[in-house]
Image: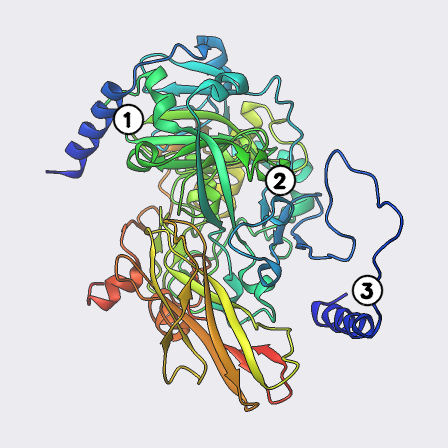
């Protein structure tokens, strides 16, 4: 069922329910459950898009418009798999670290959990999020257009702490990270990032990683494009040169209008989007509506978010939900009185480096229509007199 | 201070900062050799063995054609074309293929060996991977049908888009705003 239809039915049900009297049960309620589940009325789900005949290959998108706060429930975290989700036995899984190191070592999961642990909340965004917008194929909902974005609390060990065991040699410039999926996906990571804030992660939102998120071990590179955060991590090789793997040459490079392609474009630039009201929703009445959404940047902290409710003519600061964390999703809010007239609403963020989120036209003037990755322009939503909210750039 | 010098300092600082805890077990030379699948642009990591496009044609027909089509034309977006598009990257309708876009022939070998065929990866012998790699390069007019690809010749293959990639840490939008191309 499409989201608007589902919303309409939910609204009808709510109207019916509001006429009924809520009854307090006179008998004791349901049994407890060893592992909890959400209320049956809550139906928020990911949109799955399988890219090939092979099961599990493709992507699924987070319902951003139905998320509260900044943490994405693990069950709704976006997915992008290049050869399905492998079933890995954590008891036998190992991480091999070799190459330009003094002592090549093999670690069990128990070994890695013995290191001093670290937890950090950060966003993860696929480098290909909103790829359709480059070519004017604007998805009708925020889940479709921005849903390759999530935010979790990740727990593991700082990679530099583990590297003290192997003794990385001073001439190491790159780290090749390899996954244990069927395609053994591989990316090359510069040493600066490895030593700065890279994490080996086994926990997500208080429990073990979900299989779809790399169980039992993944790399987390805060603020960097999702694909470099290699899942099902099995091997780290330290080298002088990048591997020039398929996923850092054929894919995840931005072809610019002059025919050159931007490579190793790791950092996700500052971006924001209004998640409510957003495409596919309908404003039930004139008057007060809270505008809310997310802002994020791979360059540190979000400094401010501005909202325009008059087609970009005037802008006003939105309120940012504290705490504003570096490299995490930031929730913004903006009170709005809708007068019933057609308009366009949009958000624009600025990060701590001073980078201002570009308009679609400015982004296209630089990247051209065939870049494919790192789309991060302002997204307007058109509000019709009927209250319907539709996609429009 | 140069970036390289800064990195050296960072590495030395990390080496000095944390004392090893004695976790993990030594990796054996045999397990490293088995796991180290990456082929680098200079040819490091290539196995012994060899192949030609002439020999690769049959392997391709048996293992690759069902998805990538009889001669690397591809089948819709999910099964990308392997050939063509050379010279198209700066046009309004660029076609990114192995021939037009991939900067290193070693990447072709690496990707076929680790990830292909899609439904049973790592099932080809080294000679078969060399041969299919040679066939894909031949389809693009990059090597002759009889040219032997091995650990010496493959890294020497010059791909048409070898110099088509740039790396700037700064965002292209920021560069444009500053008036930098």
**Residue designated by label 2:** A212
Asked where in the image residue A313 lies, by quadrant, the reply is: bottom left
Subunit of label 1 = A
Location of residue A129 with respect to A230 vertically, above or below: below
Asked where in the image residue A373 lies, by quadrant, the reply is: bottom left
Tell me where residue A104 appears, x and y as whole percent: 39, 14
**Residue designated by label 3:** A22
Q: How far apart, in angstroms, are the residues tagged by discs 3 and 2? A: 39 Å
- A233 or B100: which is nearer to us? A233
Q: How far apart, in angstroms, are the residues tagged by discs 1 and 2? A: 31 Å
Subunit of label 2 = A
Location of residue A160 with respect to A142 vertically, above or below: above
B181 on left or right of A237? left
Whether residue B145 is visible, yes or no, is no
Label placed on residue A172: 1
Location of residue A133 with respect to B46 vertically, above or below: below
Tell me where residue A183 appears, x and y as whole percent: 58, 35
Tell me where residue B4 appears, x and y as whole percent: 18, 34
Same chain, marks 3 and 2?
yes
Which callout, 1 or 2, points at the residue further toward the start of the chain? Answer: 1
Q: How far apart, in angstroms, are the residues tagged by discs 1 and 3? A: 66 Å
- A63 or B36: which is nearer to us? A63
Locate the N terminus of chain B by quadrant. top left
Subunit of label 3 = A
Helix, strand or loop status at disc 1: loop
Locate the C terminus of chain B by quadrant. bottom left
Categorize mark 2 by other alpha carbons within 10 Å: few (<14), some (14-19), many (20+): many
Tell me where residue A197 appears, x and y as whole percent: 35, 36
Label placed on residue A130: none
Question: Which is in the foreground here, disc 3 or disc 2?
Answer: 3
- Toward the front, the furthest residue is A26
Same chain, marks 1 and 3?
yes
């Amino acid at each position: 069922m499409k989201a608007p239809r589902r919303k309409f039915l939910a609204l009808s049900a709510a109207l019916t329910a509001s006429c009924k009297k809520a009854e307090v049960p006179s008998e004791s309620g349901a049994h407890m459950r060893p592992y909890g589940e959400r209320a049956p009325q809550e139906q928020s789900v990911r949109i799955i898009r399988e890219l090939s005949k092979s099961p599990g290959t493709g992507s699924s998108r987070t319902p951003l418009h139905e998320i509260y706060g900044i943490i994405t429930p693990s069950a709704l975290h976006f997915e992008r798999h290049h050869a399905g989700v492998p079933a890995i036995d954590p008891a036998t899984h190992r991480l091999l670290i070799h190459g330009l190191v003094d002592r090549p070592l093999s670690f069990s999961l128990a070994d890695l959990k013995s290191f001093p642990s670290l937890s950090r909340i950060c966003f993860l965004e696929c480098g290909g999020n909103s790829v359709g917008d480059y070519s004017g194929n604007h998805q009708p909902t925020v889940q479709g257009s921005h849903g390759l974005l999530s935010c979790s609390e990740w727990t593991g060990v700082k990679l530099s702490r583990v590297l003290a065991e192997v003794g990385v040699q001073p001439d190491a410039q790159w780290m090749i990270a390899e996954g244990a999926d069927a395609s053994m996906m591989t990316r090359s990571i510069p040493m600066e990032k490895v030593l700065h804030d890279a994490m080996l992660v086994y926990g997500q939102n208080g429990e073990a990683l979900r299989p779809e998120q790399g169980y039992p071990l993944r790399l987390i590179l805060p603020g960097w494009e999702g694909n470099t955060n290699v899942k099902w991590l099995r091997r780290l090789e330290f080298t002088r040169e990048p591997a020039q793997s398929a996923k850092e040459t054929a894919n995840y490079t931005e072809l610019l209008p002059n025919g050159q392609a931007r490579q190793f474009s790791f950092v996700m630039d500052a971006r924001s989007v209004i998640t409510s009201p957003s495409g596919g929703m309908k404003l039930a009445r004139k008057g007060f509506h809270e505008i809310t959404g997310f802002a994020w940047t791979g360059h540190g902290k979000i400094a401010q978010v501005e909202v325009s409710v008059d087609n970009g003519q005037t802008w006003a600061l939105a309120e940012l939900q504290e705490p504003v964390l570096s490299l995490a999703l930031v929730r913004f809010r903006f009170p709005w009185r809708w007068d019933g007239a057609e308009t366009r609403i949009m958000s624009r963020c600025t990060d701590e480096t001073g980078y201002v989120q570009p308009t679609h036209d400015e982004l296209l003037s630089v990247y051209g229509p065939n870049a494919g990755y790192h789309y991060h322009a302002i997204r307007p939503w058109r509000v019709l007199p009927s209250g319907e909210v539709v996609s429009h750039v | 201070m140069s970036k390289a010098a800064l990195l050296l300092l960072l590495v030395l600082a990390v080496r000095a900062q944390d004392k090893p805890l004695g976790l993990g077990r030594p990796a054996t030379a045999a397990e490293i050799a088995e796991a180290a699948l990456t082929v680098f642009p200079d040819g490091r990591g290539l196995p012994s063995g060899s192949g030609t496009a002439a020999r690769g044609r049959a392997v391709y027909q048996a293992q690759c054609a069902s998805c990538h089509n009889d001669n690397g034309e591809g089948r819709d977006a999910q099964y990308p074309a392997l050939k063509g598009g050379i010279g198209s990257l700066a046009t309004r309708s660029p076609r990114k293929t192995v021939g037009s876009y991939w900067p290193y022939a070693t990447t072709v070998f690496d990707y076929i060996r680790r990830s292909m065929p899609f439904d049973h990866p790592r099932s080809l012998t080294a000679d078969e991977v060399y041969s299919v790699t040679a066939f894909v390069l031949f389809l693009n007019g990059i090597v002759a049908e009889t040219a032997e690809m091995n650990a010496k010749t493959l890294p020497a293959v010059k791909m048409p888009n070898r110099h088509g990639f740039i790396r700037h840490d700064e965002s292209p939008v920021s560069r444009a705003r500053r008036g930098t191309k």
